[in-house]
Structures are given as C-alpha cells and as structure tokens.
Amino acid sequence: MSFFEYSRAVAFCDTDAMAVVHHANYLRYFEEARVAWMRDRDLSDTHFPKADSALAVVSSRIFHYKPIAFDDIAIIRLQVKRERLRIYFRYAMHSDKTDDMIASGETVHVAVNKELRPVRLTEKFTQTLEKEPWIETWPWNS
Amino acid sequence: MSFFEYSRAVAFCDTDAMAVVHHANYLRYFEEARVAWMRDRDLSDTHFPKADSALAVVSSRIFHYKPIAFDDIAIIRLQVKRERLRIYFRYAMHSDKTDDMIASGETVHVAVNKELRPVRLTEKFTQTLEKEPWIETWPWNS
Amino acid sequence: MSFFEYSRAVAFCDTDAMAVVHHANYLRYFEEARVAWMRDRDLSDTHFPKADSALAVVSSRIFHYKPIAFDDIAIIRLQVKRERLRIYFRYAMHSDKTDDMIASGETVHVAVNKELRPVRLTEKFTQTLEKEPWIETWPWNS
Amino acid sequence: MSFFEYSRAVAFCDTDAMAVVHHANYLRYFEEARVAWMRDRDLSDTHFPKADSALAVVSSRIFHYKPIAFDDIAIIRLQVKRERLRIYFRYAMHSDKTDDMIASGETVHVAVNKELRPVRLTEKFTQTLEKEPWIETWPWNS
C-alpha cells in the first residue's frame, strides 16, 4: 500500500534555541502535507478560497521521538479517512538523515463554512476519501 | 483550589484567513503560559539559558471547542504534575468575550541538556512540582 | 517628551538555532506594540474587526544592533505620524538586560477595508494622530 | 541575465485575518529563497550547522505592492553581492496568478560565528559571490 508523501527542507526560522525544529511547527508541517495531498487529489476547488468550505481542526496530537534540524529534509507520509462528519489525518515524519521516525501525529477535522458552521462535504471529496488507503497499524512509534 | 493563570491579547499575526487564531499557535500560547508559570514559581534559574536544562516536548494534544479571534484576550489556566521522568502540563483556554471554553490541551515533557539528552530535574524543581495542585477532572471539555 | 512603550517577554518559540530572536519576529513584536498603542489610545473601535478598516503595511525596515534572547524582556517605544494617506510608525527596541539598543525600525501603513481597498481614516483616528509626539532624531542607532 | 529563482506554495498558516500573507512572513519566504540559493551554489558546507558561520541579518526592508493569498504560488527571484564585510540580497516576489509584482525587499548580512562575532567569509563563498549577476535597476516597484 502506498501513502501520500510530502517533503520540505527545514527552514532556519522554524528552529529554536535548542537548534531543532520547535514543536509548534510540526502542526504547520502537517498542514502543508495535508494541503499538498488535497492538491494532489485535485480537491482544491472544494476548499477555501475556491469554495466556501475549509477543514477546521477539532483536535490534534503529536508524538516526538527524535529532533529534526536545519539542513534536514522533513519527509511526511499521511493517511486519511472519514467517519461520519469527521476527517482523520495521520502523519509520520522522517528525516533524510536517518531511518528513525522523527514524529507522528493526528489531526481531526470537520468541514466548515466561512462563518465556521459545519457544512456537508462535497460528493467529490467524499468519493476521494473512500479510495484512500488506511491502516490501523499506523506507525505511531519507530 | 487555584490554578496558575496567564493572559495575553491575541496577536493579529496569529490569526489566519478564517479570521481566528491558527491551530498551531495554541502550542505557542501554551508554551508562554508554561514559561510564565516557571517564572512565577521562581524556576527560571533551573532552565535554559541560566542552567543546562530545558523541558523538551515528547507529546502534545489539543482539543478545540470554539474559535478565538483578534481583539480577544486568551486566558490560560494550567496544572502540572510529575510522574517519574515525565512532567505533564494541562491547559484550559478561555476568552474574555465568552464563558465557553475555547480549547484544552496537554504537553508532556522530559528535562534535557543542550545535547538533548535526558537529565535529572533539580531538587528545587521537583519540590515545587510536589506543591502544585492537580485534579483528574481537568475540564477537557466545556 | 514621552513615547508609548510596550513590553513583552521574549517567547522561546521566537528564538532560532543561533539562540536569539529570529529577525522575522521583530515585525511581529512591532505589530504587538502598534496594536497595544491603538488600544491605549482607545482606537480599537476604528479598526478591524470592530470597523471595516485595517492598517495595511506598505513597507517596513528594521535595523539590528544587538541580539535579544529568551529570558530577556523586549521593551519597544514607538512614535507615529500621518502624512496624507500614509501612517508612519517608528520603533526602538531595548532589552531589560542592557542599555544598548537592540533594534529600530519603521512600518508605513495605509488604511484599507476588508477588500484591501484604501479607505479614509476616521476623524477620531486622525485627531489622535495629531496629538502624538514625533521627533526627526528618532534613535535609529544606539 | 538570469537570477536565481525559488518557488513555494503559500501556506494557510502564513495568512492572517485579512486572508492574505502576513507581512512578517515575507522575511521568512526571503530566507527560504536565500537558503535555497546557498544550496544551489553548493555553499551549505560553509554555513551553520556544517561550519561555524551564519549570515546574521543586520538590516532588512520590504516594499509591498499587492497581496498574495493561500492557493497562490510565491515566486522569488534574488540577486546578491558583497561589499567588504557586508552581503546584500535583493528579492522580487511574484505570484503565479498575476504578472504584477507582489513585493520586493533587501536583507543585509554579515558572517558571524556561534557567539555572533563577525568572521571572515570563506574563500569559496567569496568566489561564488564574485560570479553572481547584480543590476542596480533591480525592480523595486512593478
């Protein structure tokens, strides 16, 4: 089974005084991976600003195993599934410098309109989600 | 029982195109509350940069109930406890504009040195933690 | 003459791998000072989200003299003046740890509505600006 | 003459409540372009963390002409020159959605070591800079 993968160089401004990526920035990297997945699946026209719908975050969690530093490439794999109104993304982050897992995490979403009220997912979005692979044995830990 | 409380005005740069605080910034607000607690408890001299020790984040989670916007004041209450090597902070965020809970969350930490290797907590830090109140019925939800 | 002053503790997440505040965050600190000035002058009701008007940034510059680190307090003084459609803010940042100037800077603004089209400043805003002190010998350097 | 060019999708977390990229984030995008240039010129081994040298920012300025939004691609061209101890980078940002210039800017740097003391540029860095194109008619405005 193959999962969507997104890569980006660690930015210098994303590091902190411990010389590694600050923990709050993992949620920003996860978001970039999520948006890249949506573009890859041709779903941008179902999302803000092209449509009056965005995936609001209702909860998130991150597990950190190893630090990642400037000069590393962050490689993020993700899987996504829908359960009724909720969309679950799970992430696994590696670095190009080591085989160890850097971090894993989950964000849970509901579709909302510009007034932040829940809205129905488009048919196109729902159908795309049905075709996505999902494993319960997602590597939460290395 | 009274918990430590930290307040800060929502910064304009912390909002996103949905006109509310972006979810990654909650971890930054929680960190500010944590650091303010450390200063209030006179623990700054046991932490980077005054000591070779910092509280690395090993996991975090956030639950979002309501949005918070520019022009609101974020009010964050926290509790903290130690279990062997791990330190647990739990947060509850309110706004000055409503009684509803905005978000709650948890960050789990271990003390590390500049090389990010685990180190022993100072006696002073440990003793302070023993005096902190902790309730299992922390308001995870409003 | 006395200028408006705003203070805030340096946040850990605002530092970078050189262990000092990352240069992009100075614009965020300047913005916080600007917003605090607006609140102090009771101008919040003339600005987004209470009014359909915001001060868009048309240019900015920063001069860095010394670094500032976690555990420092950033103290920002500012002056502001209007020239026709443009509003000029000048900033001088100090730390509580030293008498040296950390940085100075300028942001230039025009009032815009939600569609980012230029709008007239309210009478109240204009009158407030007329009472603000301004010196050409603003300390650009220590 | 051809200048180095760097592209990146606008991240959702980089927008603010006006639904456009927040002005402080331009310095982060400029930095990404600068680092990409250094990698392209094979200079990473002369810079932190591979060498004890980083390009500290001594001043910066940005001119904003148009907003840029989520769903746009930011395209940044840059030129760089050395004048004695100082290195000057100039940037011009476009969007994939329009021919208009979004912003231009400049950052001025000196090489420093981990203690933030000025250090000599490596021979390799200096020689690379000598081969870079530079035009005084850099498009500061559209």
Image (cartoon, coloured by chain):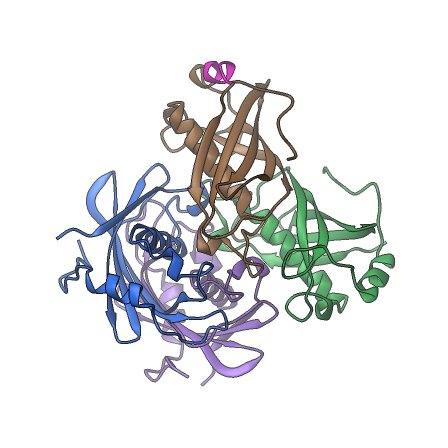
Chain colours: A blue, B purple, C green, D brown
The image shows residue D80, relative to residue B38, as above or below, that is above
Point out the stretch of residues depicted in magenta.
D126-132
Regarding residue A119, the answer to whether it shows in the image is: yes
Residue C58 drawn at (x, y percent): 68, 46
- Answer whether residue C68 is magenta in the image: no
Please give the count of numbered marks on the rendered protein: 0
Query: In the figure, is residue D22 to the left or right of B90?
Result: right
Q: Tell me the residue at 20%/52% (across/down).
A: A3
Q: The C terminus of chain C lies in which quarter of the figure?
A: top right
Q: Tell me the residue at 72%/71% (across/down).
A: C45
Residue D134 drawn at (x, y percent): 57, 19
User: Camera-side residue: C3 or B85?
Assistant: C3
Furthest-front residue in view? A123
Residue D91 drawn at (x, y percent): 56, 32
User: Camera-side residue: C96 or A96?
Assistant: A96
- Answer whether residue D129 is magenta in the image: yes
Main SS of residues in magenta: helix
Q: Tell me the residue at 39%/64% (across/down).
A: B125
Residue A81 drawn at (x, y percent): 23, 66
Regarding residue B91, the answer to whether it shows in the image is: no
User: Camera-side residue: B46 or B16?
Assistant: B16
Q: The N terminus of chain C lies in which quarter of the figure?
A: bottom right
Q: Tell me the residue at 58%/72% (across/down).
A: B73
Query: In the figure, is residue A60 to the left or right of D107?
Result: left
The image shows residue D135, relative to residue D70, as above or below, that is above
User: Camera-side residue: B39 or A33?
Assistant: A33
